[in-house]
């Protein structure tokens, strides 16, 4: 069978191209692995590595910051050397190695496993998202719906992995089957098995991508192309010890974060020389979205940090009358809501478009912040529903996540989609990498914010902890509100930079 051409792929009939489903499942399993591991990190660090909660928060923020920072590097190597497909494959292999290491001996090899996972995710995550954008021709109005579906896949994986792994590790699931001493190993083991499934799904279906994601070095002699590729593989392995050193030492994390952001900006401005004024204006607009998303993720990503500890200390275990692990709920409620409402939000946009009242992407981002503010305000409100031991309502907490989810749906899938629309072809993966790099800064700031909240409450009783944490969330609600208003006010200027892109 001859290879599918790009136009054959992009001229698909119906709402979604079939390739999107393959990417959906591959990403779903990858996110299962990623969020499964992530949901265990802070609890593992506190209970097994004996870190205090302040240090654990910073350490957690550092791992997440590194994961997303390497998406920029992974994007850069994909655009210039490997192409999206080989990058994704390589990333998957490294992620499998990382999760197997953690499954074997998480206490001894914690940072080694994390190091592999960080570099692996850097090669995997931005490039699978860029391939989604490639399935659509320029101006295809079905693009946003495609990213929304893909995002539902992200969250389906996050939901199952986020709940299952921590619940097994905490002994709330499979407790009669898994021996106590092996709980953490089995939980990390789940993450590695599903990562293998993710990669197999991709390998078995990648033929359907035709020329999408092939090597950018097709015109070079074969031996030269191979040399560059092998250097990239070898270089990424050689860099892993450096990452391990940096991620296990908060001072290096600070340094790295100070360097990678400015470096990415200098790189972007350097690349801008190759494009005309119209293209560069669009890149500037992309930068505005990227900068605001940093703030969004800094608040949102309290999820794996301070909200994890809040859930463990201050929440009861009853959701609508059903007994559930509050950490499991914190890890997965948001994903459940995304899966349930991603399509609905898509339909609302289409309906508004028909009435000619669909907000543009900038205003949607602004709305994202307003929902975020609302959700954190609900987290603040939980302090008024607590008993004398500082234990409060899991129901109300889950309701906060419900509101925040609408904010996420206004910002995250739309953000990925707008990156592919605003970037010139040769810069697609780098811009997607920068989009996720913003998450790295968000995670990094989230760790600092979370550590501040945690340190203020280190020696307090549970009730005081509740008050300190929830007052912190009230502050975040206020800042999110301000950011939302600012975005809506500046939307006409950003729209001008975007030109015909909506
Ligand atoms: N939850 C989304 C994902 O895992 C977005 C992550 C992010 O950009 N911070 O893909």
Image (spheres, grey):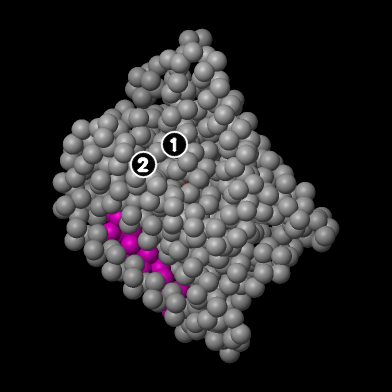
Disc assigned to residue 146: none
Which image quarter holds the C terminus?
A: top left
Q: Secondary structure at mark 2?
A: helix
Give the CA distance from mark 2 to mark 1.
10 Å
Between discs 2 and 1, the one toward the N terminus:
1
Please give the name of the residue rendered at 28% of the width and 59% of the height, measured from the top-left corner.
Answer: 366
- The location of residue 467, given as percent across then percent down, is 50, 84
Residue 348 vs 176, above or below: the answer is above
Q: Are marks 2 and 1 in contact (CB under 8 Å)?
A: yes
Residue matched to label 1: 76
How crowded is the residue under tag 2: few (<14 C-alpha within 10 Å), some, or many (20+)?
A: few
- The location of residue 205, given as percent across then percent down, is 55, 25
Residue 73 showing in the rendered view: yes
Q: Give the side of residue 408 with respect to residue 117, left or right.
A: left
Identify the main secondary structure in magenta. helix
Residue 219 vs 350, above or below: the answer is above
The answer to which quarter of the image holds residue 149 is: top left
Residue matched to label 2: 267
Q: Residue reaching furthest bottom?
A: 388
Q: Secondary structure at mark 1?
A: helix
Residue 227 belongs to the span the image colors magenta = no
* Mark 1 Cβ and ligand 1 under 8 Å apart: no
Residue 161 showing in the rendered view: no
- The location of residue 262, given as percent across then percent down, is 38, 51
Q: What's the magenta region? A: 364-382
The answer to which quarter of the image holds residue 418 is: top left
How crowded is the residue under tag 1: few (<14 C-alpha within 10 Å), some, or many (20+)?
A: many
- The location of residue 355, given as percent across then percent down, is 18, 47
State the residue in front, 233 or 188.
233
């Amino acid at each position: 069978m001859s290879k599918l051409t790009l136009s054959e792929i992009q001229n698909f009939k119906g709402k979604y191209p079939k390739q999107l489903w393959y990417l959906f499942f591959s990403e779903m399993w990858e996110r299962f692995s990623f969020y499964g591991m992530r949901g265990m990190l802070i609890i593992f660090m506190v209970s097994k590595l004996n870190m205090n909660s302040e240090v654990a928060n910073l350490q957690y923020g550092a791992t997440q910051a590194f994961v997303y920072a390497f998406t920029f590097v992974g994007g850069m190597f994909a655009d210039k050397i490997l192409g999206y497909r080989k990058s994704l494959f390589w990333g998957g292999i490294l992620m499998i190695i990382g999760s197997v290491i953690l499954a074997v001996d998480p206490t001894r090899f914690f940072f080694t496993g994390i190091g592999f996972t960080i570099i692996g995710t850097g090669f995997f995550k931005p490039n699978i998202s860029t391939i989604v954008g490639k399935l659509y021709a320029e101006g295809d109005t079905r693009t946003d719906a495609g990213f929304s579906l893909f995002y539902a896949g992200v969250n389906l994986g996050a939901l199952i992995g986020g709940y299952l792994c921590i619940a097994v590790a905490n002994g709330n699931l499979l407790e009669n089957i898994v021996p106590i001493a092996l709980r953490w190993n089995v939980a990390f083991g789940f993450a590695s098995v599903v990562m293998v499934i993710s990669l197999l799904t991709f390998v078995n279906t990648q033929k359907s991508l035709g020329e999408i994601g092939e090597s950018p070095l097709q015109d070079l002699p074969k031996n030269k192309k191979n040399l560059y590729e092998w250097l990239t593989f070898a270089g990424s392995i050689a860099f892993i010890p450096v990452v391990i050193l940096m991620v296990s030492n908060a001072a290096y994390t600070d340094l790295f974060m100070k360097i990678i952001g400015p470096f990415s900006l200098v790189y972007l401005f350097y690349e801008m020389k190759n494009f005309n004024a119209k293209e560069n204006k669009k890149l500037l607009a992309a930068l505005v979205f990227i900068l605001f998303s940093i703030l969004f993720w800094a608040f949102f990503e309290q999820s794996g940090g301070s909200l994890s500890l809040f859930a463990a200390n201050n929440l009861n275990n009853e959701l609508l009358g059903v007994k559930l692990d509050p950490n499991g709920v914190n890890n997965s409620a948001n994903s459940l809501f995304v899966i349930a409402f991603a399509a609905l939000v898509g339909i609302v946009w289409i309906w508004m478009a028909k009435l000619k009242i669909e907000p543009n992407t900038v205003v949607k981002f602004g709305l994202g912040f307003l929902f975020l503010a609302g959700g954190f305000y609900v987290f603040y409100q939980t302090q008024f529903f607590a008993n004398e031991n500082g234990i409060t309502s899991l129901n109300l907490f889950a309701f906060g996540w419900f509101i925040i989810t609408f904010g996420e749906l206004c910002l995250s899938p739309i953000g990925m989609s707008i990156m592919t629309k605003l970037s010139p072809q040769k810069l697609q993966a780098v811009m997607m990498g920068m989009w996720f790099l913003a998450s790295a800064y968000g995670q990094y700031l989230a760790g600092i914010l979370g550590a501040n909240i945690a340190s203020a409450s280190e020696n307090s009783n549970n009730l005081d902890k509740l008050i300190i944490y929830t007052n912190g969330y009230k502050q975040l609600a206020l800042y999110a509100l301000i950011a939302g208003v600012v975005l809506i006010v500046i939307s006409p200027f950003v729209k001008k930079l975007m030109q015909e892109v909506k």
